[in-house]
Image: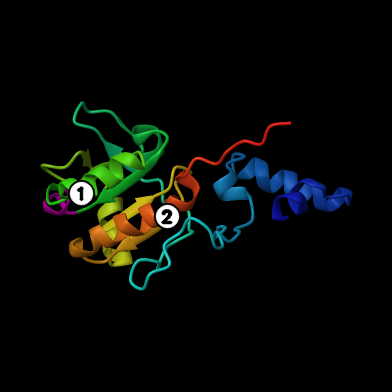
């Protein structure tokens, strides 16, 4: 809606003001477009359990990360498509047991630690570290569309997050017969 109000300006004076503002801002959308609220998903494949649902349904931030090979890019560009479990606690990722690892594998969830030394992805800008701290979380499970499924404040709740994701997917993972004519 807000973008339509920018594009569809019929008054010539207002359109000229808009054009001048856009040119002055270098046509950078972050500088020239109105600030809008980020969409939040409703019910569906999002965590609902107490202590896991704080950020559920919000879009994950896109801070840069660096791989062990020295490639730096935004998270989506580094991890690609698919569900992702990010944790700022390397020890928590190492403690994921066989059962929970199987559940993650079955749901095609890849696990990445993010931080400094000893992590899969380096947080060289410290933006991820600040985000984890500001949100008071130790891990976040991102859906394949990179919306937040849920978060866990403590590493000990990581298994609850895995169970919650598995349970949310269970009704749709059962093969549904296709009707024939």
- The residue shown at (57%, 38%) is 177
Range covered by the magenta-colored residues: 89-93
162 or 17, nearer to the observer = 162
What mark, if any, has residue 148 been given in the picture? 2
Q: Where the N terminus falls, by quadrant?
A: bottom right
- Quadrant for residue 43, please give it: bottom right
Closer to us: 152 or 76: 152
Place of residue 79 in the rendered image (x, y in percent of width and height, measured from the top left) = 34, 35
Does any portion of residue 123 appear in the rendered image? no
Locate the C terminus and report the quarter of the image it occupies: top right
The answer to whether 120 appears left or right of 19 in the picture is left
Is 147 above or below relative to 50? above
Give above or below for 135 relative to 124: below
Q: Earlier in the sequence, mark 1 or mark 2?
A: 1
Please give the residue where the numbered disc 1 appears in the rendered image: 99
Image quadrant where residue 27 sits: top right
Asked whether 2 or 110 is in front, the reply is 110
Residue sitting at x 43%, y 67%: 48
User: Where does residue 9 sit, x and y in percent of width and height?
Assistant: 83, 50
User: Is 72 left or right of 176, judged from the image as shown?
Assistant: left
């Amino acid at each position: 809606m807000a973008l339509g109000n920018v594009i569809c300006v019929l008054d010539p004076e207002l359109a000229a003001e808009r054009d001048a503002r856009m040119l002055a801002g270098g046509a950078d959308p972050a500088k020239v477009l109105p600030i809008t609220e980020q969409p939040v998903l409703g019910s569906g494949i999002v965590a609902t359990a107490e202590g896991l649902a704080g950020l559920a349904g919000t879009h994950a931030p896109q801070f840069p990360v660096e791989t062990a090979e020295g490639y730096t890019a935004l998270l989506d560009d580094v991890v690609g498509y698919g569900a992702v479990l990010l944790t700022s606690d390397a020890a928590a990722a190492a403690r994921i047991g066989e059962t929970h690892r199987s559940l993650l594998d079955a749901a095609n969830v890849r696990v990445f630690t993010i931080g400094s030394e000893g992590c899969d992805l380096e947080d060289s800008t410290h933006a991820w570290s600040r985000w984890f701290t500001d949100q008071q979380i130790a891990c976040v499970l991102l859906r394949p569309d990179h919306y937040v499924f849920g978060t866990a404040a403590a590493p000990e709740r990581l298994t609850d997050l895995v169970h919650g994701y598995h349970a949310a997917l269970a009704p749709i993972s059962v093969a549904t017969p296709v009707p024939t004519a």
